[in-house]
Every structure is written in structure tokens, then in C-alpha cells.
Image: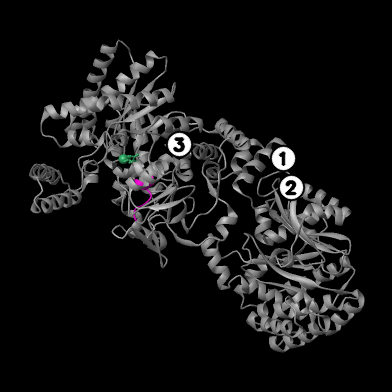
Amino acid sequence: MSATKWVYGFDEVAEAEQRYGGDWEGVRGLLGGKGANLGEMTRLGVPVPPGFTVTTEACLAYLGGDETFPPGCWEQVEQALHRVEKAAGKRFGDPQEPLLVSCRSGAKFSMPGMMDTVLNIGLNDEVAAGLARLTGDERFVYDSYRRLVQMFGSVVLGRPDEVFEEVLAKHRAEQGVATDSELAAPRLKAIVAEFRRLAGGFPTDPKEQLRLATEAVFKSWNGKRAVDYRNAAGIPHDLGTAVNIQTMVFGNMGDDCATGVAMSRNATSGEPKIEGDYLINAQGEDVVAGIRATKPLEQLAGDMPEMYAQFAAIASRLEKHYREMQDMEFTVERGKLWLLQTRNGKRTAQAAVRIAVDQAEEGLITRQEAVMRVKPDQVDFFLHPQFRPESRKGAVRLANGLNVSPGAAVGVAAFDADLAERWAKQEGKQVIMVRPETKPDDVHGMLAAEGILTSRGGRTSHAALVARQFGKPAVVGVAALEVDMAARTMAVAGRVIAEGDWISIDGTNGDVFLGRLETMVPDISDPWLMRLLTWADEVRKLRVRANADYPVDAERARRYGAEGIGLTRTEHMFFETERLPIVQKMIMTTSPEERAEALARLLPYQRADFEGLFRAMDGLPVIIRLIDPPLHEFLPSTGDLTKRLIDLKVEEARGGKVAGEITEVEALLARVASMHEANPMLGTRGVRLGITLPELTRMQVRAIFEAACAVTREGVVVHPEVMIPLVSHVNELKVQRELLEAEARQVMAEQGIEVKYLFGTMIEIPRAALTAGEIARYAEFFSFGTNDLTQTTFGISRDDAESGFLVRYLRDGILEDNPFATIDRNGVGRIMRLAVEGGRATRPDLEVGICGEHGGDPRSIAFCHELGLDYVSCSPFRVPIARLAAAQAALQ
Ligand code: PEP
Ligand code: MG
């Protein structure tokens, strides 16, 4: 058996590749990301300072073997070092022609700054003196030397870095300078001596330096920082790190030296132009640390035209090779260009889209790859205002809550809906509506506000649903926020914010800021995004519909690419100011005549709503769901009524003539109390309401079909689909279907127009899913209401969940994901699968979709694709995201 190869020269990457049969992932696993890339660049002929990689296998053997090098390993390091000496024409530890090396970690997955590095290895007093003679630059040499001792002292010998920093500070003060780079050579020499004393045990033998540094890097794999990082990033703990030992090159040896970082394209806008920063006569960390003002890369073309031309050619070559935008580090040492690192570059959402599209059009990648390269959440960027990064940087962050509806919003705090509306509409103020939580009768305030902030509530809370639907930025469930409605203030992070004070909220990440941050508005009509989404449409199998209650939402949804409406929550229309009293009357009256009258007054409103939706969705399907929510949402609260009663009684005691009003409120209170349900979410809602109040179902059906006939006359093509919510038993559907068909037939006969429609149901109770085969006898389509299905499958209240124990569950890892945000595949998902199979067994052409909040979540969309659903439906603002996510699901 041949001996294990523990060390690979940068010029031996082909051998590593061979070992893994060409599998680059295997090579990265063995040599780490950095080592594999240095090898790859070397193979491409890019100038990389010579060096070699000690493998992750060696690291694992070292850590697993009582911290000793495995047999043969150190000998291989020495041989590799010898080859580097030859290539560089220098010798390690030789004062006449000294080679200095760096020793850096490099794991399979990038763990920036989490492990250790030692630079300038190979210096001791003799070598430093020799190098000073050779370069004629004492200052540079002793600065390099003191850096070595400092790094070695802290990384290898475990001295706290502050010890060294204190010495530097003392010398700066003595010499009267502000920065280390101003310290003169004799002083640096003295510092080296002091550092060596402080470090205790700094080895003068360069080989010993290298050996100890290599061991330290191995050990840093198990350092606390690295372990914590891997836990957070989900990186396995058994991979080990490679160690890269590489010839040092210096960008700080004079004015023919430079160092910089650069991207092969603009990382902010995506423009196809290299951009970066550099410094003449400086070291890499000077560029990153921002101590000296860097120059934009274009100026290198003037400063060092030859270097610039070479670098630009290399950047382009690397990008073509990796087929990705590259982020590179380079150094010019005495007129020679070296590349120290290349990796795929990080970029903004806007740049990600433009780069993917440009690269596809340049033929560098395929269109399908372009579609895969953009994260669905990056599309979100184009749909909402954002805070300017400069503005966010200096801002005071007060708290962080649930990021339930993306975008940035700025306004003065208003603590109730009426005030929010008045300030916004009458006084033209920008308002953030702040509430402990929102209720349906807060909607007018929410619509008038720029954004919504609540201290309670979760991802499917009322505030979240409404905000998402209307594209209002919202942060909810901010536990640190105490809203004092009596004092009209909110307290957070030790500050008290009064009504009218400016606040800023970021619904994209849940941040709440004090004051007025600056925003900017990106745009969905970005030409690159439009092209990318068209490519996505070409490959996706799932259709994308929108949840929309109003014509404006439907129009927006259509602009964003929706192929119909998947859910109209008709009850939302009932909450409008003029309608609510009629709705309340209709529900609370015990007189059939009064109810009929109330319904007759509601009919024209509903008809007009539906006409608007049909017109906006001309030619596309529109699912209208009959009334759903628990009744108490429509009724005045007993608390409000009791308070009103007390006020009236006080007034009466003072001689006010309010007896009539008191009787009225008392009756109302008695009626509301009599309708009280302990568990309204499991009470008279959904189809149960339709069965209890058949007149209500009839009115809604009439409104739908009268509207359909009316717009058909205008030439609009309608495809209504009537949907029944919260069905758990087939008989519920049977009863409603009979009622509906009779009414629909009657309206069509009256109007003399035949409207083709579908009749279907939501699947949002486990029993409905389990008996889907029976239910499909009466339903032509299913739509998964995964908000309720999650609530009823888990037995977790969707309204309270995220402010209570679920937070702890997620923190402690009892649940990996919030099931109200991402479909729980094993539980809820399994039930969905049963429903699809059962339903299609009865009715092969059954149309199946989803309209719960999960319909806009990329991971849930992937699951819906796997289940073979026909469409997903989500808020208009998530339609573009869903288009991309559906395409990615199809391509995966
Ligand atoms: C659902 O339950 O998933 C659903 C879409 O209905 P709603 O959120 O209106 O209860
Ligand atoms: Mg529901």
C-alpha cells in the first residue's frame, strides 16, 4: 500500500482531482475551499505565490491522534517546502535570500475569521538583519517581524492580544504618533524584543515556527469561535481544516508595490465592470481595515497600467473559469502581480439578478442556471422600499420582532386606527400604526399607515395577514415593546416614545429604529428581473395565483404575473366602515325580516366588489370564498360595550337623558354575551356559518353570479370558482352545493346568461383531508388552507403561537422551523398528500392548490411542486417570488 499523501503542492491539484474521479466537491473536502482554489488558479496559469496545502485528513489524524502529526506528514511538509524554495529561488531561514511563508486555515466551507492564521513565518534576528540588508528597508522588515511575534504569541502561545497592543500604544505615545505605520525602524526593533519577552518561548528556528503554527491552525478547528460558528451555520464538525502554507509576498516594500481587493463585476449594481479598492505601498489588512483611504481600482490603470491590464485579464479569465462573479485579493510586489485568493463574490439582490441575466446572455451560463442563481427572497428587494444602507448604519435600533411583511417604513407613531387615518389622510403625515395587536376594525388605520408595528401576534396574526396582503411593511410580536394605551406611549430598550415621535421599521428583517431613516424605492420593472422571471415562467410547472380581496390588489397581482385569484376572503369586504354596522345587524338580529333587509343592503356592495375582481382578472380564474371568520370578529367586544354602559350610567346619574341608549346597549351586550364562544376559532365559522345562516350563503352566491353576468355582458371573460371554507364532513359540502346550485341557476335564468363555474372547498381541517375521496364527489377543486390546517393538525392556535411557547420551541430546536411559515412536511405535509391522493382517486381532474400563507414561502412551494399541485396562491407582493421558487422547484 502506498503511503498516504498528506500534502499537496498548489501545482498538484490535478492529482487530488484524480483521487476523487474529477469530483470537485471531494477536492474541496480534502484541500479546503481556499487550498482547492489556489491549486485551481495555479493550474490555470494565474500567478499565485508558490505554496502547498496540508490536507483536512492530516488535520483529522492530528486531532484524533493525541495531537501528533500522522506518520510521514511532517516529512512531506519539509519536502513540499523544499520545492517551494526552489520555485521561489529563496531559502527558508537563510539570511542571504530568505523565504517567508504564511500559514492559514482553509476549511471546506468558508468560516471567515473563525480560525487562525500566522504570517511572516521564517523571521528571526539573523534573517531579519539579512532581509533588511537585502531590501534596504529596515522599517518594513521589523514591522513584519513584530507582526510575526505578535500573531505567534497570541495564536500559538495563547497570550492575550491586548498585551501586545498595550506595548504598541505605549510606543505610539512616546513617539507622539497616531498609527503603527508611523513607528520608526529603531522603535520597531525595540518592540520586537519586548514582544519576544512577552510571548515567552518564541522559537527562533523557522521550521519550529512553521510546525507550531501548523499545529495551532489544526487545533483552531476545535476552538470555541469555530465550533459556535459551525453550529450556527449548520456545518458538520467532523470535516477538519486544511492548512495552506504559502510564500509571503509584500505590497508594502515601496511605491512599485500595491495591494487590493476586487470584484469581477460591480457587487452593488451588477454592472459588468471590475470594481475594487487598492493602496500603493500597503499590506492587505490596511485595505480591509480602512485606516488609509483606499483608491478605486480604475485609478490603478493610471498608477500601474501594466498591472491593471494583467489584473483585468485575470479577473475575466477567472470569472469565465468559475462561471461566477469573483471576489479576488491581489498584491503587487516590486512590479510583479500576484493573486492571493479568489472566491465567488457576495452581492446585493439587485446585482444578483443583473449578473445572472447578463451572464446567461453572454453565454457564460444557461438561462436555467441563471434562474437557479437568484434566491427567491432576493426578488423581494424589488417590491418594497428599503432603508439606505448609510442611513441604517448610524441609526439607533430599538428592538427586533417578527418580519412578517417586508419593506422599510418611516412615520410618526400613532396608537389607534382612527388617529392613524386622520393624521395620514387629513394632515398628510407619514404614520406608523402601533398597537398591542390589530383587529379587523383597525384596517382603515393600517391602510392609511406607512407601516404597522405590534407588540403581540405571530406570522398569521391579523396584522400580519392584512399587512402582507396590502404590501405594508410590518413588524409584529415585538416582545420588548410595551405599548401603554392610556399614556399613549411605547417603552422599548429603556426609551419612551410618545405618540407623534418618528420611528422606522424594517419588515424585511424585523428591525425597529428610533427616528427617521432614509428610504429608497427599487422597482419591479427592473429589466433584468423581468427577463429572469420570464425565463422562470418557461420552466415552472406550478401556476401562480394571488390572494386578493379588492380590484386594486388583483390588478397589482396581475402586473406581477399572477394567473388568477386563488383566494378572495369575502369577509374582509364586510369590515369597511359603511358595511360593518349592517353586517353586525345581520348577524345579531333574531328577526328574519331584519336579517333579509340587512342582506339586501349588503348585496350591491358585494356585487360591485366581485365585478371589479372579474374585470381585473379578465380571462383568468377567480376563486371566491364564502364568508369564513369566527363571528366575534364582527361583533363589538363585550369589554367595549361594558365600558360604554358604565359611561352612560355615569351620565344618567348626572342627570343625562340616556335611558333609551342604555336599554339599547344592554340588549346588545346580552346578545353578544349569548353568542359568546369559548373557542371561536373552532366555533361558528366557515361552512358552519353558511349552514347556520343559509340566507347569507344565498346572498353571496347571488352577488357572485349577478356580477359574473353583468361583466360578461361587457365582454369580460369570467371563470368564477366558488369555495367553501372549513369543511370537515362531506355532508356539509353537499348541503351547501345544493343551496348554491339552486341560487346560481336562478340568477342565470333571471339574467339569461350561462356562466361556467367550478364549485370547490378548502382543505383546512384534518378530517377533510382524511376523507378527501368522499369530499371530492362534491368538489371540483381543493385549496389547502394551510394556516388552519397547521393550527388544527398541531393543535396550536395560529393567533397566539409565535408570541408564546413556539418561540422557545424554535430557540431550543424542538421545532426546526416555524410550521406557520414553512409547511411541516412530516405532519401537515403528509395530510396534504393523503388529500391529494384521495381527491384525485375520486376525481382525476380535480384542481388542487394552496392559499394559506405557505403559498408564498419558497420551501413550501417546492413541497407543493413535489405533491403535484396545480397552483400556489399568495399575496400579490409574493407573486414574483413564487414564480421564481416554482421554477427552481421544477429545475431541482
Ligand atoms: C387558511 O386557513 O390557510 C386560509 C387561507 O384561510 P384563512 O387564513 O382565511 O383562515
Ligand atoms: Mg382558513
Question: What whole-number distance in Å separates the C-alpha atoms at marks 3 and 2?
Answer: 36 Å
**Residue 523 % position (x, y):** 57, 39
Ligand 1 lies under 8 Å from the Cβ of mark 3: no
The stretch of residues the image draws in magenta is 456-464
Secondary structure beneath dot 1 equals loop
The residue that label 2 is drawn on is: 319
Kind of residue at badge 3:
Pro
* Residue at left offset 32%, top offset 12%: 753
> Dot 3, crowdedness within 10 Å: few (<14), some or many (≥20)?
many
Q: Earlier in the sequence, mark 3 or mark 2?
A: 2
The answer to whether mark 1 and mark 2 are in CB contact below 8 A is yes
Marker disc for residue 364: 1
**Residue 441 % position (x, y):** 29, 43
Marker disc for residue 778: none
Ligand 1 lies under 8 Å from the Cβ of mark 2: no
Kind of residue at badge 2:
Glu
Between 735 and 494, the residue placed more toward the observer is 494
Image-based side of 131 in relation to 710, left or right: right
| Direction front: furthest residue | 655
Q: Earlier in the sequence, mark 1 or mark 2?
A: 2
Secondary structure beneath dot 3 equals helix
> Dot 2, crowdedness within 10 Å: few (<14), some or many (≥20)?
many
Magenta-drawn stretch contains 666: no
